[in-house]
Amino acid sequence: MDPDCLWRDLLDAIQRQDSDEAVAIATDLHEWLTRGGFPPCVIPALREASKEQLSVARKFQHELATAACAFVISMT
C-alpha cells in the first residue's frame, strides 16, 4: 500500500469529478489509516517532519487524511 499514491489518485478523481472512483480510493485509504497505516503526505511542507513516527506533523497529516476520506465517503 502506498498512501501517497492513493492520496494523489484521490485528488485526481476529485478533480475529474469521478465520485465512484473517489469513494473507492477514499475507502481503501481510510481502512489503511484506521488499521494504523502511516499517513500520506497531505502537506508537502511537512514531509521531513512527518518521518518521525511519533511526530506531531505525522499525527496531524493522519488526522487530515482520515477526515478527508470520511468526508468523501459520506458524499455517497
Image (cartoon, grey):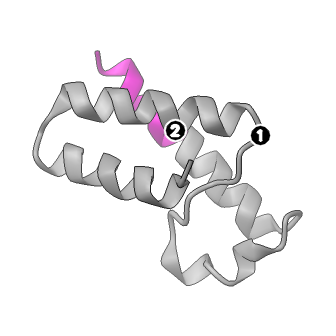
Element type where label 2 sits in the image: helix
- Residues at badges 2 and 1 in contact (C-beta under 8 Å)? no
**Disc 2 target residue:** 29
What separation in Å lies between label 2 and label 1 (alpha carbons)? 11 Å
Label 1's element?
loop
Sequence-wise, which precedes: disc 2 or disc 1?
A: 2
Residue that mark 1 sits on: 36
* Other-residue count near label 1 (Cα within 10 Å), few / some / many at <14 / 14–19 / ≥20: few
- Kindly identify the residue that appears in the image at 65 percent across and 39 percent down: 33
The magenta segment? 67-76
**Magenta stretch holds residue 16:** no
Q: Can residue 48 be seen in this view?
A: yes
Magenta stretch: helix, strand or loop mostly: helix
Percent of width and height locating residue 50 = 72, 72
Q: Which residue is drawn at 38% across and 35% down?
A: 25
- Amino acid type, residue under disc 1 in the picture: Gly
